[in-house]
């Protein structure tokens, strides 16, 4: 347990950051799930639109430090290949 004022403040800040990051991660997962569902349905137009919406969210996750840029690059590459193969 934090005892010093500085440690207590850091604990409060960590809790706030955790909540914000958790919300961002959840939002990113939602966009990815929409793409996955469109791919599973076999609708290339909807999947491409969902992927186009998901890309800025993923990039925002990189800039905010939620995800590593190579992780996002890998996810985008694999998703776009799967969407392309639907056609």
Image (tube, helix red, strand yellow):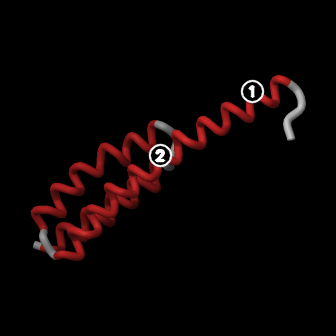
Instruction: In the displayed orientation, state which residue is furthest to the right.
Output: 3
Q: Mark 2 points at which residue?
A: 23
* Percent coordinates x, y for residue 72 in the rendering: 41, 53
Give the number of callouts. Answer: 2
Q: Nearer the viewer, residue 84 or 26?
A: 26
* Percent coordinates x, y for residue 67 in the rendering: 49, 49
Is 35 situated left or right of 3 in this image?
left
* Percent coordinates x, y for residue 35 in the rendering: 26, 63
Is 73 situated left or right of 15 in this image?
left
Q: In which quarter of the image is residue 37?
A: bottom left
Is 27 situated left or right of 2 in this image?
left
Who's the residue at 45% across and 37% down the image? 63
Provide the secondary structure element on which disc 1 rests. Answer: helix
Q: How far apart are marks 2 and 1 (CA)?
A: 22 Å
Q: Residues within 10 Å of mark 2 (few under 14, many from 20)?
A: few
Q: Earlier in the sequence, mark 2 or mark 1?
A: 1
Q: Residues within 10 Å of mark 1 (few under 14, many from 20)?
A: few
* Percent coordinates x, y for residue 17 in the rendering: 59, 37
What mark, if any, has residue 81 been given in the picture?
none
Q: Which of 79 and 23 is in front in this view?
A: 23
Who's the residue at 39% across and 50% down the image? 27
Who's the residue at 37% across and 43% down the image? 59
What mark, if any, has residue 9 been given in the picture?
1
Q: In the displayed structure, would residue 62 be above or below residue 32?
A: above
Is 49 situated left or right of 30 in this image?
left
Quadrant into which the C terminus falls: bottom left
Q: In which quarter of the image is residue 42?
A: bottom left
Quadrant into which the N terminus falls: top right
Who's the residue at 17% across and 59% down the image? 48
Provide the secondary structure element on which disc 2 rests. Answer: helix
Q: In the displayed structure, would residue 84 be above or below residue 53?
A: below
Q: In the displayed structure, would residue 5 be above or below residue 38?
A: above
């Amino acid at each position: 347990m934090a005892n010093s004022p500085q440690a207590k403040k850091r604990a409060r800040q960590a809790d706030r950051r955790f909540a914000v990051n958790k919300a961002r991660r959840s939002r990113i997962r939602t966009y990815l799930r929409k793409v996955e569902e469109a791919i599973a349905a076999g609708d290339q137009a909807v999947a491409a639109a969902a992927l186009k919406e998901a890309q800025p969210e993923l990039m925002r996750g990189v800039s905010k430090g939620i995800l590593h840029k190579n992780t996002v690059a890998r996810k985008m590459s694999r998703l776009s290949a799967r969407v392309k193969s639907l056609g």
